[in-house]
């Protein structure tokens, strides 16, 4: 496998072999390693792009979903995004205080609230999408446009299948399970 990483280039220049797995393949050929490195880079860069947005990535998902799909019931939105309903309440409180979303009564069920972006929320979303495109260009910059499109399509197919096999119903429960496994 060819790599352009500075560490590999430096090791090669010194005649040192790249680190290998038990099979003898360089670590860079390992799917888990590659996914982890790309995810780590994207997570750091996107966190910087979403700086200042209440809820960070979750706040962005709320804005993007309600803008694209129209107003949604609070509980439906929480289920769709895999967010605990209590956490969703606090997230929406923060987004509402920032003037980015509004809660309004659901005409079909007066007990329920519909979540919709405000005009300010739509403007913020446009800016966030621009910043995230820049982030994607940084992370995927080594690929040309055709390769980026193929990468996104293939990754989406794998992600949809993985989610169908092992769906994330509640991110908070997953985090709690992970905490238990670490102890």
Image: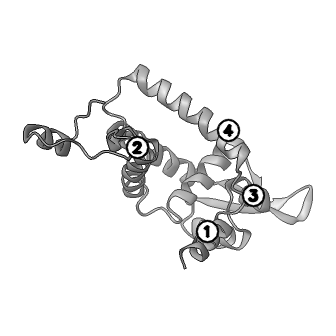
Chain-order first, disc 4 or disc 2:
2
- Camera-near label (4 vs 3) is 4
Q: Please report the residue visible at 69 percent of the width from the left and 55 percent of the height from the top.
A: 168
> Quick one: 114 or 28, which is closer to the camera?
28
SS type, badge 4: helix
Residue appearing at x 59%, y 52% in the figure: 61
Q: Are marks 1 and 4 in contact (CB under 8 Å)?
A: no
Residue at the disc numbered 1? 91
> Residue 72's x, y, as percent?
76, 53
Decide which of tag 3 and tag 1 comes sooner along the chain: 3
Query: Is residue 92 in view?
Result: no
> Pointer 4: what residue?
161
Q: Quadrant of the C terminus?
A: bottom right
Q: Position of residue 134 (x, y in %)?
A: 36, 40
In the picture, measured across the screen, residue 148 lies left or right of residue 153, that is: left
Residue displayed at 66% across by 71% down = 87
Q: Which is more N-terminal, label 2 or label 3?
A: 2
Q: CA distance from mark 4 to mark 3?
A: 19 Å
Earlier along the polypeptide chain: callout 4 or callout 3? 3
Left or right side of 34 for 3: left
Give the mark nearer the N terminus: 1 vs 4.
1
Disc 2 versus disc 1: distance between alpha carbons? 32 Å
Crowding near the residue tagged with mark 2, few <14, some 14–19, many ≥20 C-alpha atoms within 10 Å: few
Mark closer to the observer (1, 4): 4
44 vs 144: above or below: below
Can you tell which mark lies on residue 79?
3
Give the Cα distance between marks 1 and 4. 29 Å
**Tag on residue 34?**
2
């Amino acid at each position: 496998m060819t790599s352009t990483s500075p560490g590999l280039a430096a090791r090669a220049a010194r005649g040192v072999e790249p680190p290998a797995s038990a099979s003898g393949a360089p670590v860079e050929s390992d799917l888990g390693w590659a996914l982890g490195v790309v995810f780590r880079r994207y997570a750091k860069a996107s966190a910087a792009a979403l700086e200042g947005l209440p809820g960070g990535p979750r706040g962005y998902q709320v804005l993007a979903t309600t803008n694209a799909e129209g107003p949604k019931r609070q509980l439906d939105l929480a289920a769709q995004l895999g967010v605990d309903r209590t956490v969703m309440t606090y997230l929406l409180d923060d987004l509402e205080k920032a003037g980015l979303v509004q809660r309004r009564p659901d005409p079909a069920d007066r007990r329920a609230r519909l979540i919709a972006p405000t005009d300010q929320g739509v403007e913020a979303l446009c800016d966030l999408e621009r910043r995230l495109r820049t982030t994607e260009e940084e992370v995927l910059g080594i690929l040309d446009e055709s390769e980026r499109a193929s990468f996104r399509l293939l990754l989406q197919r794998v992600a949809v299948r993985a989610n169908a096999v092992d769906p994330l119903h509640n991110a908070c429960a997953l985090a709690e399970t992970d905490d238990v496994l670490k102890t």
